[in-house]
Amino acid sequence: MRLEKAGLSGFLPPEIYDAPFMAIERVNVLGVAISAINLQSALAAIADAVRHKRKGYICVTGVHGVMEARRDRQLRHILNGAFLCTPDGMPMVWTGRFSGHRQMRRVYGPDLMLDVCAWSEANPCRHFFFGGAPGVAALLAERLKARFPKIEIAGAFTPPFRPFQPSEERELAALVRAARPDIFWVGLSTPKQERFMAEFLPKLDTTLMIGVGAAFDFHSGRVRQAPLWMQRSGLEWFFRLCQEPRRLAGRYLKNNPVFAVKILGQMCGLKKYPLN
């Protein structure tokens, strides 16, 4: 399988991309450039971006995100233009290791959030939480403050379940400008959070946006996480399906088998998926 450098034509203006971003190798997974990283290297890249005020957005991507991107070229363009596109699911990791990236590990959104928060207790970094059901962002901020007492929380905001009105966009921009966050955490579903980050990063006064989806629900205590052994064995999807069958059945039962067939074809050289 062909390995790709992260120097891809992205959704954001080219001046955003810089040397540390260009140095991160990526693995082509059905035309989506997944960063060949682990939690330690992801944290190092985030810390460097925060210290040097390098703007970018980070997508935490698994099978669902890749399959959505197969059906939507603009979403594929957004994922391939991310500062990092982390391997959120074990199939991303297995594909990367098959490609020769033995150091590649799962960079799971909830784990990444905790590691970044722990790092920021000893380093200057302000956090803003955006997303979730009503009250979840504020509850998440409260829970994380209790867990990491030295963390700097700049604000929390629950968006409406509809597109922003122009006046609401201006209000959000003013709120973020006053809060001055270094990291703007986004807790929406895929692909909504990826589209939001690509559109709003140039509009908001923040350094990094990180889309972590269900991490808001997990760390606020609203939803229970899968046991660690299920996370590591690639069965978290089954645990979540059992929790929310009505919402997730269509996603998993449709995407997972099709992904397995397509990635096998790519690995065997029967089908190529360009990064464009």
Image (cartoon, helix red, strand yellow):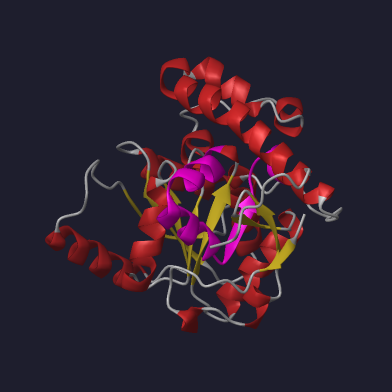
Q: Is residue 108 left or right of residue 196?
A: right
- Magenta residues (range): 64-92
Q: Position of residue 214 (x, y in %)?
A: 49, 38
Does residue 161 lie above or below 125 as drawn? above
Q: Position of residue 108 (x, y in %)?
A: 64, 44
Give the quadrant of residue 7.
bottom right
For the residue pair 100 and 262, the one nearer the viewer reads as: 262
Residue at horizontal 44%, vertical 48%?
141
Q: Is residue 192 left or right of residue 55?
A: left
For the residue pair 152 and 87, the one nearer the viewer reads as: 87
Q: Is residue 121 visible?
A: no
Residue at horizontal 59%, vertical 43%?
110
Q: Is residue 136 visible?
A: yes
Secondary structure mostly taken by the magenta-highlighted segment of the chain: helix
Residue 91 on the magenta segment: yes
Does residue 136 lie above or below 211 as drawn? above
For the residue pair 18 and 133, the one nearer the viewer reads as: 18
Give the quadrant of residue 259.
top right
Q: Position of residue 247 (x, y in %)?
A: 41, 23
Residue at horizontal 60%, vertical 59%?
274
Residue most extreme to the front = 270
Residue 249 on the magenta segment: no
Q: Is residue 275 left or right of residue 186?
A: right
Does residue 218 lie above or below 105 as drawn? above
